[in-house]
Image (cartoon, rainbow, N blue to C red):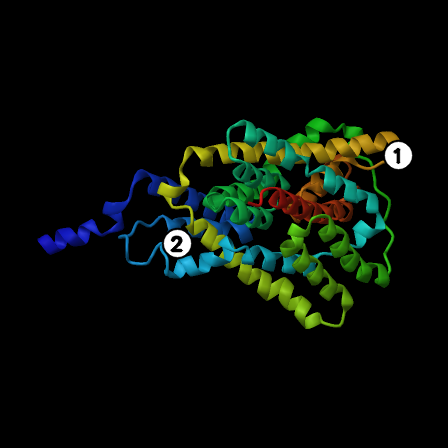
Amino acid sequence: MDLLWQFLQNTGYYLAGWENYLMLVVGCLFVWLAVGKEYEPLLLLPIGFGIIVGNVPFFKGFGLGIYEQGSVLSYLYFGVTKGIYPSIVFLGLGAMTDFSSLLARPKLMLLGAAAQMGIYFTLLGALGFGYLPKEAASIAIIGGADGPTSIFLTAKLAPHLIGPIAIAAYSYMALIPIIQPPIMKLLTTEEERRIRMPEPRQPGKKELLFFPVIGIILCCFLAPASIPLLGPFFFGNLMKESGVVDRLAITARTAIIDTATIFLGFTVGASTQGDVFLTPKSVGIFALGAVAFSIATASGVIFAKIMNLVSKEKINPLLGAAGVSAVPGSAREVHVMGLKADPNNYLLMHAMACNSSGVIGSAICAGILWSFNVG
């Protein structure tokens, strides 16, 4: 009976606290959203299952937990804490990205820059609520709506907040169809939503080849700390556009990014152990993250309306909402909103231009915040 009692004391049923059960519900919710609702399944499925695995209670000292040195999960988590997985994801994103629409209408880059205002407003808000500067910077980057960038910066500045910040960033990315449409509708008129964008020109081969080279020089000279993200990003794009390393480009945008996404999502989910994750700071992060994402969306839309006041050629203000770097979710949502106003209004390619510039913008912002918080 003593042996039986010792065995029962070592089971998860005995060791579990209310925090574990609550996080198990959250993990199951993520899995359901991914499978049942198809909300960003590539993100939510590995994160959701990781949350479930990370909240199975275990006897300490066995080398099982993600925070126990030498455990299998801790080795996999190394790619998160050192920023390896986000850099690999950016390599794949670069190999996927087509900058044709952006080069065809360069002024759409301004919308990607404007949407980053959510980062800086949230930075001030987080500082006002008493978060330390490094914590505030990590929370603020959620406004860029870029999961890998949020994880990368948090790993450098506030590693103890990786779990809640990553979950918040990916949650809001998955909830784009719920969050962005009301904001877009509130800030635009029916007439503005019907503005049609002219067919973009097709940039030449030389333009597409020169862009990643010029882009890395301009962006990383401005914010050298963004090299770990933008270096792989522009390199991946150069492989794609060069046409001479198709095997490498295909591998980068398929096998490599898929592998990194699996380990990134799973280990981030597993890091959300209830006793570590459920703190007052985590609740504050989710609240500020929602504000950041909303302000970013609104900033892009409002700036597009301002551009229309001084430009002869009108821009559909909905495109400003695609300035956040949630690729391709926000661009797709802008396109859907445009079709509702006018079934023949195709905004997807123009929205992707804003989307891709938003990816660059959020990485630059992360580099700037990192450089200000070193030491």
Ranked by sequence position, the earlier of labels 2 and 1 is 2
In the rendered image, the vertical position of residue 93 relative to residue 333, given as above or below: below
Residue 72, picture quadrant: bottom left
Q: Which residue of the protein is positioned furthest toward the right in this rendering? A: 312
Tags 2 and 1 in contact by the CB under 8 Å rule? no
Q: Which residue of the protein is positioned furthest toward the front in this rendering? A: 375
Residue 281 place in picture, x, y as percent: 45, 34
Residue 302 place in picture, x, y as percent: 74, 31
Q: Residues within 10 Å of mark 2 (few under 14, many from 20)?
A: many
Residue 112, picture quadrant: top right
- Identify residue type, mark 1: Ser
- Of residue 364 and residue 241, the one placed in the foreground of this image is 364
Residue for badge 2: 66
In the rendered image, the vertical position of residue 307 relative to residue 20, given as above or below: above
- Identify residue type, mark 2: Ile
Q: How crowded is mark 1: few (under 14 residues within 10 Å), some or many (20 or more)?
A: few
Q: Which residue of the protein is positioned furthest toward the left in this rendering? A: 1
Residue 323 visible, this orientation:
yes
Q: Which residue is drawn at 69% across and 27% down?
A: 186
**Quadrant of the rendering where the C terminus is positioned:** top right
Residue 38 visible, this orientation:
no
What secondary structure is marked by label 1? loop
In the rendered image, the vertical position of residue 256 relative to residue 275, given as above or below: below
Q: Which residue is drawn at 64% across and 54% down?
A: 229
- Alpha-carbon span between mark 2 and mark 1: 54 Å
Residue for badge 1: 311
Residue 312 place in picture, x, y as percent: 91, 35
